[in-house]
Image (cartoon, rainbow, N blue to C red):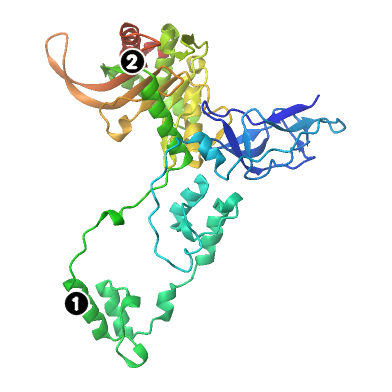
Amino acid sequence: MAVEVFMPKMSDHMQVGEVIRWLVEEGDQVEQGQVIMEVMTDKVVADLEASASGVLKGIRAGVVEGAIVPVGETFAFIAEPDEEVPALPPLVPAEGGEAKEEALSPSIAPPPEPAPPASAESSARSGPVRATPVARRLAKELGVDLSQVQGSGPGGRIKDEDVRAFAESQKGKPPEASRAVRASPVARRVARELGIDISQVKGTGPGGRIKEQDIRSYAEALSAAPVSQPTEADAEWLELNSIQRLTGQRMLESVQTAPQFALTVNVDVTNLLWLREGLMERIEAETGERLSVTTLLVKIVAAALKQYPRANASFENEKVKLHPQVNVGVAVGTDEGLVVPVIRDADQKSLVGITQELKAFQEKAQQMRFAADDLSGGTFTISNLGMYGIDHFNAIINPPESAILAVGRTVKTPVGMPDDTIALRPIMSLTLTIDHRSMDGVQAAKFLAEVKQRIEKPYFLL
């Protein structure tokens, strides 16, 4: 029986997906789990895997590179070699080239783009540069100005191969100005010493040749000129990518629609750090990774969520939905924006399993390429900024979840001991933000106290 290939919901807020490229063709044999397409979601470039083994058939007309496909829309089939599949109607193109971004972004008009200096290369390009996240990151690494690159994607969108091709074409090319300037060797040396752009100097020698004195006169004129102060016209405008726009929109909706409040507690992590050192060698031997505090927190929080299910809930349709699974999201910051990959059934996973998943998520975040279900289905989120020197902070709830735990850094702090002595102890700050509709302050306090107790006495992890 033929299996439908459709656009899956790859994150909690995804409405449409953009086809980046097909990795197989009509009539190809595919295996279950094989990546058959790259899709741009509202957050990242994700891999779409085949849900069955068979022959790819009946690809819908219009489902090509750059096509915008609604979530749940069928666009192909996987069937037996001799099996007939239904004919699908052509995909109706979305109105406007930016339909995907309009569907995912707040309807706020962007600030006007400052007019760039006219040049032979840039005069043909106007407006914001359209490029994939991978292309933008590669351009930054190679020092390529994206406004100079001709995109080969839909609507002129720049892809990573366009950036590589442009960088390769520029190798060994001297600047145009340097080839045209006529100057004596002494003048060139003095210009380098004084940091002068020789192409800006007018020469007084034969045929306009620049002499040493021309360079020195130009340098003196520059030093005598008044230093111009920056104005609003000099401001730099940064274009937000789809991830940043969507994150901002969701956070705005979160604070506008959910009554949120936060509770903070300080936790002594002496025993947790002792346990971490004790388990480090075994975890590192099995995973190749050091056991992190975040891994321990995921396991501890998951255990506490099983005991206090109101923290593992969503407020939907004027009711509290208690989730049967404990799926803990871990906020990960990247150059492209914030993503929250989800560790499913975290309460049932070992420290080795959680360490391996976090390692895989970090690697995927570097390329901003996740599987279809990596970013969806979270029931609770942990955001750890301790490694950046942050003492404590209030995090905004990631809808449709009802709670998020903000983790600060560990600081040696004077603490009064039971025998009335003072000792320096490693103290960590935890701040729990909750949706008051899902649980009240007493319920939140009990959950946070349970997390604190499990951190200070983590022996159940052995």
Q: Give percent across and percent down for residue 432.
A: 33, 18
Look at 27% across and 19% down and name the residue there.
Answer: 270
From the top left corner, tell me how far across and down residue 227 is, in percent.
19, 65
Residue count near mark 2 (Cα–Cα under 10 Å), binned few <14, some 14–19, many ≥20: many
Give the amino acid type for the residue marked by disc 1 in the picture: Glu
Local SS, label 2: helix
Quadrant in the rendering for residue 448: top left
Count of numbered badges drawn on the protein: 2
What is the residue that sits farthest to the right in this orientation?
A: 82
Say above or below: 328 vs 68: above
Q: Circle 1 sits in a helix, a strand or a loop, which is it?
A: helix
* Above or below, 185 relative to 118: below
**Toward the viewer: 459 or 318?**
318
For marks 2 and 1, give the CA distance: 67 Å
User: For this view, does 75 lie left or right of residue 211?
Assistant: right
Q: Nearer the viewer, residue 246 or 461?
A: 246
Which residue is disc 2 drawn over? 455
Quadrant housing the N terminus: top right
Q: What's the residue at 64%, 27% (across, down)?
A: 72
The nearer-to-camera label among 2 and 1 is 1
Amino acid carrying label 2: it is: Ile
Residue at screen point 49% across, 12% down? 317
- Mark 2 or 1 closer to N-term? 1
Residue labelled with disc 1:
220
Residue 363 makes an appearance in the image: yes
